Amino acid sequence: MQDAIIENLEKAQQKKRPRFEVGDKVNVSVRLKEGDKERIQAFRGVVICKHPKSGKGTSATFTVRKISEGVGVERIFPVHSPFIEKIEIESSSQVRRSRLYYLRSLKGKKARLKEAERFGEVVTTEEVAAPVEAAAPAETTAPVEDKPKA
């Protein structure tokens, strides 16, 4: 009885959010109240972790990291917070870990992630194929046989 009530409350609190993964560059628009005024502030960075790993449930959170004036700034957002206006996915990266905490100790070019292209829900790595040269028709010549020496 109580489980059904709790599930209904949790479903009512959940909001529609885009499916994003660890390693994605996202732009999170957060609604801030300053006195009587309300404004929207953008926080753009890389998602370095999701908790729980699936990112599901009303208590799900994600951490976004950005570099601001040479200083690393991380911010933890609840996925279903009413203060989050929208989450935009700018690009995706190919990562092999579920937590990217190692980015904290890297700077500059070493902190780059390998870009990936996103097609719907599937993420594929971006591969640049070498241009294939049109094979010119080979001249048909009879194979030359070596004559045995006498």
Image: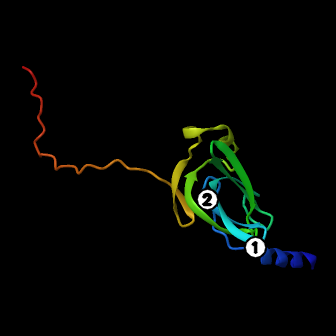
Q: Is residue 109 visible?
A: yes
Q: Badge 1: few (under 14), some or many (20 or more) residues near its Cα, within 10 Å? A: some
Q: Position of residue 23 (x, y in %)?
A: 62, 52
Between 138 and 3, the one lying in front of the other is: 3
Identify the mark at residue 111; answer none if there is no mark.
Answer: none
Residue type at tag 1: Gln
Identify which residue is drawn at 61% across, 59% down: 26
Q: Quadrant of residue 71?
A: top right
Q: Position of residue 90 (x, y in %)?
A: 55, 60
| Furthest residue toward right | 2
The disc label shown at residue 14, or none: 1
Q: Dividing the image into 4 quarters, which one contains the N terminus?
A: bottom right
Q: Residue at x 84, y 77 (%)?
A: 9
C-alpha distance separating marks 1 and 2: 20 Å
In this picture, is 46 found above or below 3?
Answer: above
The reply, left or right, for residue 142 in relation to residue 119 is left
Q: Residue at x 23, y 51 (%)?
A: 134
Query: Going by the image, does 27 lie left or right of 38?
Result: left
Nearer the observer, 104 or 119 = 104
Q: Is residue 146 above or below residue 50?
A: above
Q: Tag on residue 26?
A: 2
Disc 2 marks which amino acid? Val
| Coordinates of residue 137 in the picture (x, y in percent) | 16, 50
Mark 2 surroundings: few (<14), some (14-19) or many (≥20) residues within 10 A: many
**What is the secondary structure assignment of the residue under circle 2?**
strand
Secondary structure beneath disc 1? loop
